[in-house]
Amino acid sequence: MEVTAEKTIEAADVAAGLERLVSLIRWLSPGGMSLTSAATLATLEQSGPWRLTSLAAREGVTQPAMTQLVRRLAEAGLAERCADAADGRVVQVQITPAGRDFVERRRQVRAERLSGLLTRLPPEDQAALAAALPAIRALTSAERDGSAPLPQA
Amino acid sequence: MEVTAEKTIEAADVAAGLERLVSLIRWLSPGGMSLTSAATLATLEQSGPWRLTSLAAREGVTQPAMTQLVRRLAEAGLAERCADAADGRVVQVQITPAGRDFVERRRQVRAERLSGLLTRLPPEDQAALAAALPAIRALTSAERDGSAPLPQA
DNA sequence: TATTGTTATACTCTATAACTATA
DNA sequence: TATAGTTATAGAGTATAACAATA
């Protein structure tokens, strides 16, 4: 009972925290690619090949938008499309070695910029962040089935 | 020495964790407003009035882009522009009561969707996230002076 | 007939460059 | 002359609707 109440409160607090992370992430991120494209590439790097439709649902964009996004990534040589042997309709998308390099370079730039902010935090905050990293990974890796984001609201 | 090494590693890990949060945030967020607009409104809600140029730097967009963004927020009644008594060139931007309501509603929707994911995490991950919230708030509230994001890279 | 993905079109949002106004 | 902000224009990126292909 109390557990449920605590979790509800926590969800609201986490939601409030997530909100302003967008500003921080944009500030940390090098230009030249949209946040959506970068996030998609990171998903491909960490979770292996994806079907185009699943990837669109995962990233919270429409199927046509993902078609275009993948086309841009492919033109840049960062990802590639592969046919599915079992189902002729399906398009598999996977990252290329150049894509991995790109993700890695981008991550380094972010890390450098972030480093300056982190060192100004009190040690206990730094420790709390480090301790929460596995949880953040688990949260971003969790399946997001069922309720897709509503188109309008 | 070792401390420095540990911090560098931590920054890279945090940077990798941040990357995929964009997917999660987009998936959690109701449509109808860009992530940038929502993040800007959240900044105004939590940090009070901002000068237009400072706000643009803060959110990682150009000054003309922020002019347009604020115009859209003002047209929607969510923010308002005020003159600065001390300097006739300056435009102050602040959130309206309707803007606060909007932020709150949006936060609730995110919290509901997030709740389903959180309850599927192991208790220790939930606890770690809750413990890291003050650190996340500190990180997103920290000043981001000096090195603005590069235009191209 | 249902599902997977693409194409067509219009709209939102952003950046660069050129400009106005105040200091 | 420098700074704060706006306007003009072009381009990137996205959604909706209509379509083609495979199951």
Image (tube, coloured by chain):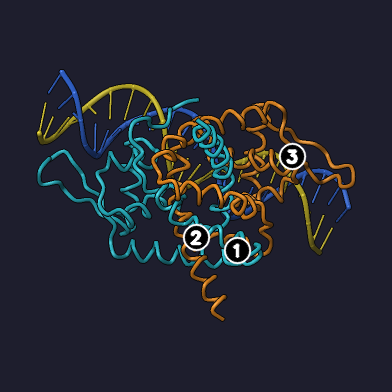
Chain colours: A cyan, B orange, C blue, D yellow
Q: Position of residue A118 (x, y in %)?
A: 60, 63
**Distance from Cα at disc 2 to Cα at disc 3:** 32 Å
Are the residues tagged 1 and 2 within 8 Å (C-beta)? yes
Q: Position of residue B86 (x, y in %)?
A: 89, 46
Q: Nearer the viewer, residue A31 or A4?
A: A4
Q: Position of residue A18 (x, y in %)?
A: 54, 44
Q: Nearer the viewer, residue A87 or B114?
A: B114
Are the residues tagged 2 and 3 within 8 Å (C-beta)? no
Q: Is residue A92 above or below residue A99?
A: above
On the image, numbered disc 1 is attached to which residue?
A118
- Whether callout 2 and callout 3 share a subunit is answered yes
Q: Residues within 10 Å of mark 3 (few under 14, many from 20)?
A: many
Which residue: 80% across, 45% down? B90
Which residue: 47% across, 26% down? A152
The three-letter code of the residue at mark 3 reads Val
Label 1 element class: helix
The three-letter code of the residue at mark 2 reads Val
**Distance from Cα at disc 1 to Cα at disc 2:** 10 Å
Residue located farthest toward the front when viewing the structure as drawn: A1
Which label sits in the foreground, 3 or 1?
1
Label 3 element class: strand
Q: Is residue B142 above or below residue B47?
A: below
The three-letter code of the residue at mark 1 reads Leu
On the image, numbered disc 3 is attached to which residue?
B93
**Distance from Cα at disc 3 to Cα at disc 1:** 29 Å
Q: Position of residue B114 (x, y in %)?
A: 46, 37
Q: Chain of mark 1?
A: A
On the image, numbered disc 2 is attached to which residue?
B14
Q: Earlier in the sequence, mark 2 or mark 3?
A: 2
